[in-house]
Each structure stands twice: as structure tokens, then as C-alpha cells.
Image (cartoon, grey):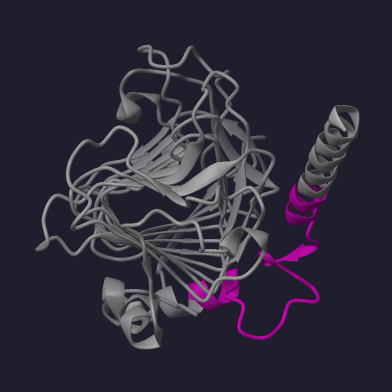
Amino acid sequence: MALSSSISSKLNGAIRIAFAILFVTSFFTLDVVHGFSKSAKPGVIDSPLLMQKIGANRSIMVDVNGNGDFKSIQGAINSVPEGNSGWIIIHVKKGIYREKVYIPKNKPYIFLRGNGNGKTSIVWSQSSHDNLESATFRVEAPHFVAFGIRFKNDAPTGEAFTPQNQSVAAVVAGDKAAFYHCSFSSTHNTLFDYKGRHYYDSCYIQGSVDCIFGRGQSIFHNYYIFVITDRRLKIHGSITAHQRGSAEEKSGFVFIKGRVFGISDVHLGKAKGAYSRVIFANSYLSQGIVPQGWTTSGYSGSTENLYQAEYDNHGPGSNTSSRAPWSKQLNEIEAAPYLSIDFIDGKEWLPAWL
């Protein structure tokens, strides 16, 4: 019986890994035309649509091979005047840009346009006790849009609970920021959705512990989350770690019509404050989601005001019969405010949404 169980466990693990490889491969080998496949259905937000909606009057070309205005992305950003009040397109041609990129708060209205997240990559390798310091990419300016770019921190995983632990791919700290067809990858603390109103459409996010964390007010639409294993830890990781300190804060992470896959068991989220708010809705949850679903690991306060919720999900990880007692299963009326673009006031500032 023990042998049979062992074989079954190994077989199950092999199937999950094979399926995971197929998933990642298919995501990064799309036949991309303006950021989506030739067979894409109507309604996909592509680069020409964004350019039309934004209506920029100035364009800067970045080419790592030297066939543009700048060889580095940071060089192009440095050329944007402080207090800029009109949209500027920075077109980043295909290639791997090994640099740290920082957009300060006094340089708004930048559209960072790549050639596809499998073609245009911003990569750095740094771990630190400071999430901001480790980040490959950091935007603090309001009114920012990115399309078709891979943001990656490829630092090796450090020792858990030491100063060399965080390896952030991107920090989003400006208000009114949108990412379309982008990807974010690291081994620990992948996407620091720090603060402000944000929209992520058709983005891929890969990580192990606290894949997405911060106190942003954000919608993740048509998302792809892939969970990898952190063998340093005995506890299960968490996809989200949202911080919200009071009922008056409008922040929260909302995941709509996406997919969660991976090769490691994981919680949907853990609390980072007494009013932590995360909602997964209309999404596919793979068998890697642990039955409890949610955790308070690292948080010792009351669970009375936590808002860790689910609505109309499907897949083997969507069974809610053993969910944490404080978690919520929403009905249609309760879920409605979070499924609307009005949750982030998107009609006031987004160039496009679905």
C-alpha cells in the first residue's frame, strides 16, 4: 500500500510538472502580432489601440543594439523633462536590457511600449533586505502605461529570513498605472504593488512566496499566475499578501477571469493588516491551492475584519468546503462592486479596459 501511494504521489507530481511546463511554454511562445496571437478573439487590447487612445505627440526609440535614440531604457527616461504633461511613447525594441529602471514621480505620462513580453525584457539580478532596493523596475510617477514587456529579477534565491531574501521584479508606486500583456518573474516577492490605483490586463506573474504584495488598489484581469517551489520553507507560500490598515482605505487586490497554476502548493493569500482585502472571482484555480485557501501566517491580530473572498471560481482548487473560517464566499450582489472597473475609478483614467 505504501509503495502504491508513493508511486501515485510521484506520478501526480510528474503530471503537475509536465502540465506546468506546457502552460509556461504556451504562454511565452504565442504568435505575437502587436502583443496578441493571430488567432486572438475580438476584444483583446493591443498596442495600436493603446497608441490610438493615448494619442502621444512624441516618440523615443530604444534599441539595445544601438539602432535607436538610446541604447538603455533609463537613458530614454532621463531624457523626459520633469513635470512632463503630455504622453510620450518610449518604444523598446526586442532584446534583453540588463539594467535597473526607475521612473521618478516627476515624470508622468510615459507609455513604455515593448515588442512582446517574450521579446522585450528588462532584467536585473539583486537580492536585498529592502524591497525597493532589490527591484529591477520601479515606477513612482502617475499616469504610466506599459505594454509587452517582461520584468525579471533573476537573482538566485537567498537564505530565508535573512537580509538577502527579497528579489523584486517590479515596484508599482504611482497612481493610475496600467500594464498590458506584461510579465513579472522572480523567486521571492515578485510584484510589489505598493500603492495607488492599478490595472493589469493579460499579465503573467511567477513567484513562490508573496508573489503579489503591497497595499495597492488594483484589478488583475485575464491574469496568469504560476507558482514555483521555495524549498527553503516548510510552510506553504501565498500568492498575495495585501496590507490594509483600516476600513476607510479603498485598497484591495481583485483577480478576475484568470488562471492559477504551478508546481507547489500555495495559499490564495495571507493577511498583512487587520483589513487585508483580496478577491478571486471567475477564475480557474488548480489543485495546488491548499484546502484552507487563506492564512494569517505572520499576522497575529483579529480575523474579524479580514476580507479574503472568492466568487464563482472553478477548477480542482476552487472547492471551498475546507476554507478558513473567516474567509468569504460571495454572492453575485456582494461581488459586483469588485468586478466593476469602477473599483479603481478606471473610466476616469484608463486608456482601455475589458
x%, y% of residue 131? 34, 29
Q: Position of residue 183 (x, y in %)?
A: 57, 49
Which residue is nearer to you in this view: 330 or 113?
330
Corner quadrant of residue 36? bottom right
* 178 in the magenta segment: no
Residue closer to the observer: 122 or 216:
216
Residue 253 lies, in percent from the top left, at 35, 59
Determine whether 88 is above or below 229 in the image. below
Residue span colored magenta: 22-51
**Image point (49%, 79%), residue name:** 52
Image position of 255 with respect to 141: above or below: below
The front one of 73 and 310 is 310
Residue located farthest toward the front when viewing the structure as drawn: 1
Seen in the picture, residue 159 relative to 64 is either above or below; the reply is above
* Residue 109 visible, this angle: no
Relative horizontal placement of residue 16, taking residue 347 as reference (left or right): right
Query: What residue do we see at 86% from left, 39% from top?
Result: 8
Q: Position of residue 316 (x, y in %)?
A: 67, 61
